[in-house]
Amino acid sequence: MAEEIKTNTNEEGAAVPSRHFIEQAIDKDLAEGVYDHVHTRFPPEPNGFLHIGHAKSILLNYGMAKEYNGKFNMRFDDTNPTKEKSEFMDAIIEDVKWLGADYEDRLFHASDYFDEMYEDAVKLIKKGKAYVSELTAEQMREYRGTLTEPGKDDPNRDRSVEENLRLFEEMKEGKYEDGALTLRAKIDMSSPNINMRDPIIYRVAHMTHARTGDKWCIYPMYDFAHPIEDAIEGITHSLCTLEFEDHRPLYDWVKNECEYKNPPRQIEFAKMYLNNVVTGKRYIKKLVEDGIVDGWDDPRLVTIASLRRRGFTPESIKMFVDMCGISKAQSTAEYAMLEYCIREDLKLKAKRMMAVLDPVKLIIDNYPEGETEYLEVENNKEVPKMGSRKIPFGKELWIEREDFMEEPPKKYFRLFPGNEVRLMNAYFVTCTDFKKDENGVVTEIHCTYDPETKGGDSADGRKVKGTIHWVAAKEAVTAEVRLYENIIDEEKGVYNEDGSLNLNPNSITVIKDAKLEPELGEASCYDKFQFVRNGFFCVDSKDSKPGAPVFNRIVSLKSSFVLPKN
């Protein structure tokens, strides 16, 4: 559920939103002169696409910089070349810009600072605060201890400064194989915080880096690199998710022992969790590799690229993040709340068009043969300034198959033999007959129309209970439409007992012959519309071609989300 937005009152007695704990911390730092400005950053590792959870971090870090007229950096933490790809970097840059986080010319990489990181490691060795270890990974785990038992000192912990400098230089020169030696911080093997038990800060890794090539065969660990990056860039407030709270003592240790002046402050906030979605990179990677989805931007996923392709807007994502709130308490939001946000954003932006997804022919027997008239229709009745358009109407139309029944149940008010309904924005029609094929499937519905009901109202005041939408058959555009459901089987949960994903076999329905208003045939990528009675739709950016758009359903019109009361 959404976090309740608490309010205070100003001097005039007007309600104002209370400030969340990060704003309060920044206010205090500025008031006490700890910093005289605010400088934040977003530091993703380019080893996959960003997802909805990352949107919270992007918007929070950027939002704080903007709120305090400060600076915002975009920085890639590219310290692990084996998992990083330029494809991921390009996607991340596009996502951040799309969300509106303007970093101007402030794009950086951890690899920009490899020389400084190496010098800082040398400084720690000279201070007796780091040493070269020969322990294997297995031995390292054995010596580390447990949550209830302290660790044991590394046999190499008391090497001389001179020997550590020599070995570290030889590591840099490539004299050792991967994993043979590591550089460890010398802190406290009995610390109750396992992160402080002489963590590894450099490892040998003969890898070609996308930006530095083969210059380095040793690479810094994230916990060592991150505070140095923040300090070099002049970050004041390093805002990160709650799992880094236990790493904060190490963050502070590194920046202090490396003697950075006016160092950054790390503040943690709760992640944003969404029920019944897949966000884990290894799971998405497997879905992509197994061909279950058509890429990291498949509209059934919740990567930012997927949401953009499906038709979500930056404004809807921001609304969702705002509703979830900023706190230290972990909470989980329903996907229905995200759907609520996109409906709220699009309902006053999107044109309301007619599209028939499961078409059956409707023939108006008494309509003049060969005649086409054009009816004026409002683009969005709730927004008069969006104007109107003219749509064709003729003898033959397409209607939804579900809008006709041969033997209807009670309270079915659409077409059936003898019943009169309203064709939306057009005329009253009365069903007179229908035809079936050899399999009993209805192929044609026949009716007559009342010319005196143009516009959908009768001169004699008679009422009809049913209104159906339609598309003129002669001018209709045939297009592919994709209806999406959650890729996870929500009744069974996200994971099976063996850890695999519980996939929904009906997560996508592809309609090849939907019949649409002619204007929709010229729609461009990312154009968004409300299809009357069927939901909000967006032109797919990947598979659409000029004059042949493919439409993704963003969300249906029905909502299961109830807005919490303040």
Image (cartoon, rainbow, N blue to C red):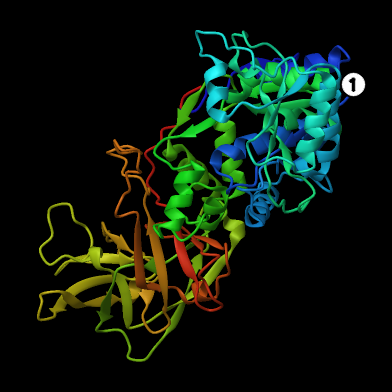
Query: What's the residue type where badge 1 is placed?
Result: Lys
Q: Is residue 233 visible?
A: no
Name which residue lies at 53% across and 62% down. 379
Please tell me whether residue 466 is drawn above or below residue 233 in the rendered image.
Answer: below
- Residue under pointer 1: 261
Could you tell me which secondary element the residue under label 1 belongs to? Answer: loop
Rendering coords of residue 210 (x, y %): 72, 54
Quarter in which the N terminus is drawn:
top left
Q: Is residue 64 visible?
A: yes
Q: Return the residue nearer the eye: 509 or 76.
A: 76
Name which residue lies at 46% across and 27% down. 564
Q: Return the residue nearer the eye: 42 or 380.
A: 42
Please tell me whether residue 505 is drawn above or below residue 402 in the rendered image.
Answer: above
Q: Is residue 390 left or right of residue 202?
A: left
Rendering coords of residue 159 (x, y %): 76, 18
Q: Quadrant of residue 106?
A: top right
Q: Is residue 34 left or right of residue 448?
A: right
